[in-house]
Image: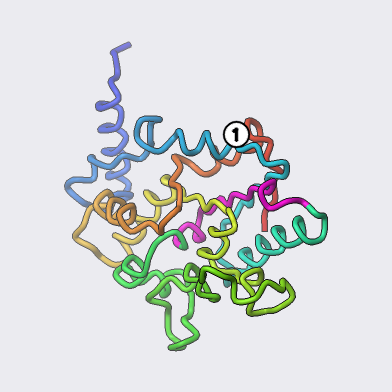
Amino acid sequence: MKNVTRRSFVSHAAAGMAAFGLLGGTARGEEAQLVWKPSDWKLAAFHKLASDPAHVKQVYDIVQIGGGKFLNNIKNSLNGLHYGFGVPEKDIRIAAAMHGPANMLNFDDTIWGKYQIGAWLKVTDPATGKPAERNLFYKSKSGLKNEPASANPDDRKSFYQDTSMEALQARGVQFLCCHTAMEEQARILVERNKLSQTPEEVVQEMLAHTMPGVLVVAAMVAAIALLQTNGHYSYITV
């Protein structure tokens, strides 16, 4: 059997995908990096998340956007654990593992506007009644002032009822972005929007416009498994 280098393997795999139209007919599709190695991403940051010493650790497996309802579930976990069960905030660690359509919540307004994400995923902007050209789910509703708008968790305007990604990050939630999903989604966007860009060029732009604090992992389904087995995170899907 002939020796197969990583470069030759990727080249042959990409050529096969091009034959089936998976690379949108681009001439430079063979440059795509469909699989990440440990040296390609912030593996140390992931290991730190997995080994977090918090007493209660929970990973949310999120695929569908569903109007962002899962963000409310995460908020309820934080409030229920802390206020209902008396778990100190420092002993709570939640990871939001977003892949599939939900993966697009990890990117800023530039990506949402340029690639018509709202039209693609049927997300409507309530301010316009049209497909969203901005990420509706990231920005804090409470403003994240130095002092919370209200220290009363029952106040709907309170920091503790803020279901934005930004507010949940401020409470220690780690949002995870899937590289594999990005590669797949880039190919869809190139085809859907009839772009001249290669899928990998779209991926690099997405990486450059990832929301602050979001950790990109190699493959979400693998990351979830490691959080459960190595990190002893409890699992929930919503």
Which residue shows up at 78% across the image and 61% down it? 83
Q: Is residue 218 above or below residue 199?
A: above
Q: Could you tell whether 224 is left or right of 136 in the image?
A: right
Which residue in the protein does label 1 denote? 51
Q: Quadrant of the N terminus?
A: top left
**Percent position of residue 147, x then y:** 57, 70
Q: Which residues are magenta?
A: 87-104
Q: Quadrant of the C terminus?
A: bottom right
**Percent position of residue 204, x then y:** 28, 51
> Tag 1's secondary structure?
loop
- The image's colour scheme reads rainbow
Residue furthest to the bottom: 128
Amino acid type, label 1: Ser
Residue furthest to the right: 85
- Location of residue 79 (image quadrant): bottom right
Residue 145 in the magenta stretch? The answer is: no
Q: Could you tell whether 169 is left or right of 14 in the image?
A: right
81 or 177, nearer to the observer: 81
